[in-house]
Amino acid sequence: MKIILASLFLTIAITNIGFAQQIDSTMNVYANNFPQEKMHLHFDKSLYRKGETIWFKAYLMADLQQSPFSKNFYADWYDNNGKLLAHTITPFFQSTSRGQFDIPANYQGNSVHVRAYTQWMLNFDSSFLYEKEISVEQPPVVKKGKTQTEKPASTIHFFPEGGDWLAGIESRVAFLVNNLIGKPVYAKGVIKNSKGEFVDSFETIHDGMGIISETPSLDNPLTAIWEDSYGNKYTTPLPMPKTNGLELQVQPSATKTIFFVKSLNEPNNNREVAHVIAHMNQHVVYKSKVSLKEQFIEGEIPTKNLPSGVLQITLFDSKWKPVAERIVFINNSLPIFTPSLTVTNKGLDKREKNVLEISVDDTLSANMSIAITDADWYNDTSSNIISQFLLSSDIKGYINNPAYYFANKSDSVKQFLDLVMLTHGWRRFKWDEVEKGALPKIAYDRDTDYMEIKGKVFGHAFNRRNAQKINLVLLAKDSTKQILSLGIDKNGEFLQTGVVFFDTVKAYYQFNKDEKLTDMATVKITNGLFSNYPKKLTNGYNFNLTLPNYLEDTANLLATKNILAQIDRAEKRAKSHQLAEVTVRTKVKRSVDILDEKYATGMFTGGDAYQFDIINDKYAKQSPDVLWYLETRVGGLQVTGENFNPRVTWHGARPEFFLDEQRVRVEELKSITMNQVAYIKVFHPPFFGSFGNGAGGAIVVYTRKGEDEQFIAGRGMGYAVIEGYTKYREFYSPDYSTNQSFETDTRTTLYWNPYVLTNAASKTFKVEFYNNDISKRFRVIIEGVNSDGKLTRVDKIIQ
């Protein structure tokens, strides 16, 4: 990576070549070598209760396509005070990833804050990382006595179009009014000059935003006197104008964006020309030279064939110094596809079955996620996959209800969206660094592969030996094993890339040339994943002031409270139906009985037999083999003969032998070590599962399986514990056709599937789920992306 970056630096270095000649190549370098990844998370619902699981699917895009770069997804989960609750890591599949986070059962906060990113995204402005507050419902706090509430404070910010306000030139100035947690506030007021004379009135027209048009004067500064919706009154000075420079004004339209360049008539201002650059997704789409012989210059940027998204327009002076900048939104046809949703079986009554079909009539493959919830549960419609990728991921600062700007193409929506452009910044580039040929400082390489087994051997004992190999046995918690043999270089390092495992594994290691080296050397092994995440989030978020979104939406709040009341009543009814006066006495099962149910089948279940729990028998661990153990534990059983030809008798008769219920010769049991065994049964005669009359009884040995299986490190083996990807847990959806549980079913998420996949050969995906005990109608939300980079969002009510 360093060699590549150095060569790129030489390629774009400004040496006797003007910035004008370098702008295209520089932008190409940024676009090709520093693509900006964008992220969206689809959650199963918008409001959770403590103790519930947040299910999510992550989508990753770059340059209007599914990102092919990063293979690992990171998410940090914080409480209301910015304290880290969990750090989760999951792999990407087709530029998507799935996972879950369990809200603690005793959680007291009213929201959980998630920050999601790839390692590559950390190289750039942290403002573009994915951030979201997820609402957590808490019981209302009843405060005794009278409480005096303070009026929330508000702030107003003025944004001259293009960046600067020039004295003597009439210009537009947008403004934004927010409260302390960044939510928009309605406000109105008047503007007065330094003499106290009325100049104009102003008022917010949408989500705390508005616009005025004034001609500023350096000798007579302007002041806003205004009042917010809380009744607070403020006095705020407007920005002071500059006495020289250039000003950029922009007027977007359907097929083109018109720009106006205004300049002050100054003596010897040495400004004969200016340059206008427009780019989108780091690609230059327009470049022109503007003559400044006139004070007022007009030009136009054709936008008819551009994709929808944020377009940045920068004005440079004759020396290619940036002097003004403006962003506009190009709202051409949205890059979307629309799957059809058909209800083939509707069951709105208690625990009835529902069947849906999702179809994509396209030859392109589609990767989607679906969430089905109670339609009366709170649903946050303020953002979605379309607004995130086309707007929010390219804009600095909080945007209230970004999905609104994609609801329709009315003139009012277009006007309000342009207000968003005027009041928010877009700074993917620092032009002074581009002029110098400086490239972004890359602290983290693209993680274009999955996990690594990355280790190093320390110690003088190793240093005195030639490079060799290390043998690794990776043992997972589910007892699955993987064996690796890796070369060790002269620095003592070894590496295996492209590894995927979940939870943790024990990596047992041994040097194949010198077993003694294991005891003499120190081996450290890591997974190669990013781990420098902040344990405390202190980037300006005021968590204590965060108001859950559902509390701000009156209609949604009333419906949600109704569902909460139904859940409470259903749970109370379930408790009242319990037979509290009936005392049920059960016999506690012995461990051998549990093992018998788990391992024995058919004729081998139950019966008159000695039973041995080898898993929990400390004596068994000291026994060299099965026959030695049985001879010391079963009265009357004798083992004679040599090791390779043993003879077993029990009360003078010869028993039959079985290994995992398959008949074997006695010498095969002699080779079984005790750490392989879970359970042994010794049946008294006659044993009816025998091929003969069973007069000698039977000895049945069961080897460990599943969670009972264990790996015992051999002699000369050390081990290290390696953290893997966060373990994924499948979403539970009950099947009431086979299991009529009497427990009260009050699920608000009825179905969640992060991977709904369609392609040319399989265009339809079937969804089956059962209703709970309280829901009367369902909400179905589908989000996704296809192989052409088009997005989808379906929000439908079934009733």
Image: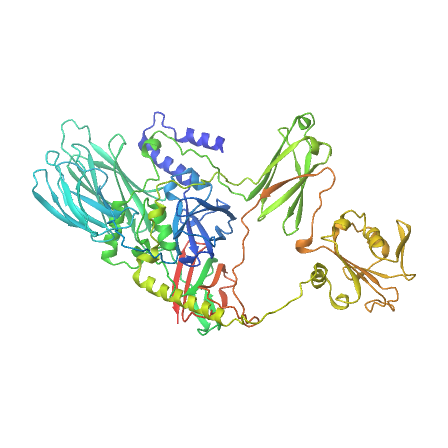
| Quadrant hosting residue 25 | top left
In front of the other: 316 or 692: 692
- Residue 662 appears at what percent x and percent y? 79, 61
- Asked whether, in this view, residue 777 is left or right of residue 316, the answer is right
- Look at the picture and state if 422 lies above or below 323: below
Side of 286 where 739 appears, left or right? right
Q: Where is residue 649 in the image (x, y as percent from the top left)?
A: 90, 58
Q: Where residue 680 sits in the image (x, y, percent)?
A: 77, 58
Question: Is residue 281 visible to the viewer in this orientation of the structure?
Answer: yes
Determine whether, in the image, residue 679 is placed left or right of residue 202.
Answer: right
Name which residue lies at 31% across and 63% down.
555
Q: In which quarter of the image is the C terminus?
A: bottom left
State how the image is colored: rainbow
* Residue 318 sits in quarter: top left
Visible in this render: residue 74? no
Residue 796, given in percent of the width and then of the height, sits at 38, 66
Where 650 falls versus 201 (above or below)?
Answer: below
